[in-house]
Image: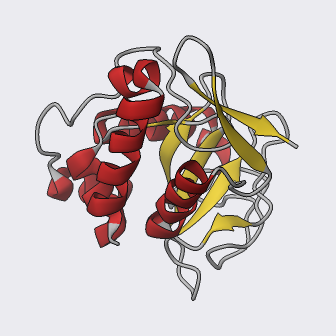
Amino acid sequence: MDVTELWSQIAHWLARHAPVTAAALRPPLEQPDFVELETEFSVELPGELRALWLCCGGTEGDVLADVLPPFYTPYGADQALASWRDHRKHWTAQWERPACDYYAGSPGSSFHPSWIPIAGDGFADELVVDLRPGRLHGCVLEWEQEHAQVLRPEWQGIAAMLADVHRSLSNGVPAGHSYPTVTEDGRLDWQIR
């Protein structure tokens, strides 16, 4: 399945089993202006990221919907851009020369301009798509704000991440080190074991 199909299947599962989480998700407010986004990010956006932002608009304001393990709420294009701009302000001194290896999927200890945020935990940690060059171009990394680092790819790409989430929800098996559960009030919750 591609990104659009996987997202649709996840949304369908959420509507049936975790309606509060499903209700928090919004469709894109309008079609993202990919030319404008690529100009600001200074990178070409991969098809998987474009597809995600065409079907997922994130959530309203500070509403959390932990769709992605272990506790990440997906961003729409507008939220991703706002987060990336915040990183650019915070990491101004290292923006042109980040403390990161050159190739996608390699570790880093400052935020890299070619990392595009796709989900956040409501505090400061995020999932980012790594658009540095190399064979892992497009992989998904976990940015840990407290340690100012990424270590290794969590998934090979957005479709792989969504396929892992879909498989986990459908079969009740872990996605990475997280197990899906649904709270009594209808929220998806990932338990780390």
On the picture, is 63 further left or further right than 183?
Answer: left
**From the image, which quarter does the C terminus lie in?**
top right
Q: Position of residue 167 (x, y in %)?
A: 55, 60
- Residue 90 in the image: x percent, y percent? 61, 33
Please identify the residue farthest to the bottom as the structure is shown: 135
Question: Which residue shows up at 65% across the image and 61% down it?
Answer: 97
Q: Residue 56: which quarter of the image?
A: top left
Left or right: where does residue 40 sit relative to residue 127?
left
> Quarter of the image containing the N terminus?
bottom left
Image x and y of residue 174, in percent: 72, 54
Q: Is residue 62 above or below residue 132?
A: above
Q: Is residue 29 visible?
A: yes
Q: Quadrant of residue 28?
A: top left
Q: Residue at x 40, y 47 (%)?
A: 10
Q: Is residue 57 left or right of residue 101?
A: left
Residue 44 shows in this picture: no
Vertical arrangement, residue 30 with respect to residue 116, above or below: above
Residue drawn at x 54%, y 21% as measured from the top left: 187
**Residue that sits furthest to the left in the current view:** 30
Residue closest to the eye, 96 or 52: 52
Question: Could you tell me how many numbered marks the image carries?
Answer: 0
Q: Position of residue 186 (x, y in %)?
A: 51, 18
